[in-house]
Amino acid sequence: MIVTLGRGPERNETPEPCVEHGVTTATRPVRLALPGRSLLLVAGMPGAGKSTLLASLPAADGVVVLDSDSQRAALRLVARGVPYGWQRPVVHLVHRSAVVAAAASRTPTVVVHLPATQPGTRAAVARLAAATRRSAHLLWLQVGVEDARRGQRERGRVVPEGSFSAHARRAEGAAADLLGHPPPGWRSITVLDRAAAEGGLRLDTEPTRAVLVRAPAAQEPTTVS
């Protein structure tokens, strides 16, 4: 299932459902329109499939993708033997610093990977987008708790139970809240389930251009004598 709410250009315009599809297949990637200067937050519980979805994005000029896995891998090289529990705060700090730097840069499209199960975290990202003159877009991956646990096991990195339980409690009902009571600051909000996310993701970053169609010139009346 894919459900997208989109805002018009007016700040106070109420979002209206603009796209609604049934279950998709892997042969049909999800397409999001991100014209102009934009920031896309890909959020959801740990193990929801955020990194897998972002890995499906083809490289493109003018698009930067910030996944905490890259910071984690870089830190692992210089902190061999250090338990990840000690590395985690550093990874989070470096990742968030990279997000702020990218948002402030001249790169047109910034894609950010964060669990963001807390409404306050999502609101902070929306404010960052506004402060850096970007339109904010939210992509929420909605999965069940057991599916998220399975995803963690498959990736080989399991979040501590206490931390994961907190994420799960906050994520419960998040999709319904986001669609039923869209928070301010977002140009669009998209909710995907796992079946839709398996189809991959594509971003349409080119601005939509209006096509001017000229009417044929009126012919002068002809007088027959």
Image (spheres, rainbow, N blue to C red):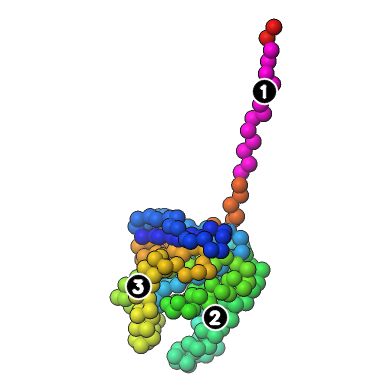
Number of residues whose C-alpha sits closer than 10 Å to that of mark 3, classed few (under 14), some (14–19) or many (20 or more): few
Q: Secondary structure at mark 1?
A: loop
Residue 173 tag number: 3
Q: Nearer the viewer, residue 9 or 152?
A: 9
Residue 218 covered by magenta stretch: yes
* Horizontal and vertical percent position of residue 28: 42, 55
Residue 202 tag number: none
- Identify the residue at horizontal 46%, vertical 64% (top origin): 189
- Identify the residue at horizontal 58%, vertical 71% (top origin): 129
Quick check: marks 1 and 2 in contact, CB under 8 Å? Answer: no
Toward which corner of the image does residue 169 lie, by quadrant?
bottom left
- Which kind of residue does numbered mark 3 sit on? Gly
* Horizontal and vertical percent position of residue 221: 67, 18
**What range is drawn magenta here?**
211-223
* Horizontal and vertical percent position of residue 149: 33, 78
Looking at the rendered image, the quarter that the N terminus falls into is: bottom left
Above or below — where is 7 with respect to 213? Answer: below
Quick check: marks 2 and 3 in contact, CB under 8 Å? Answer: no
Which residue is label 2 attached to? 95
Above or below — where is 218 with respect to 105? Answer: above
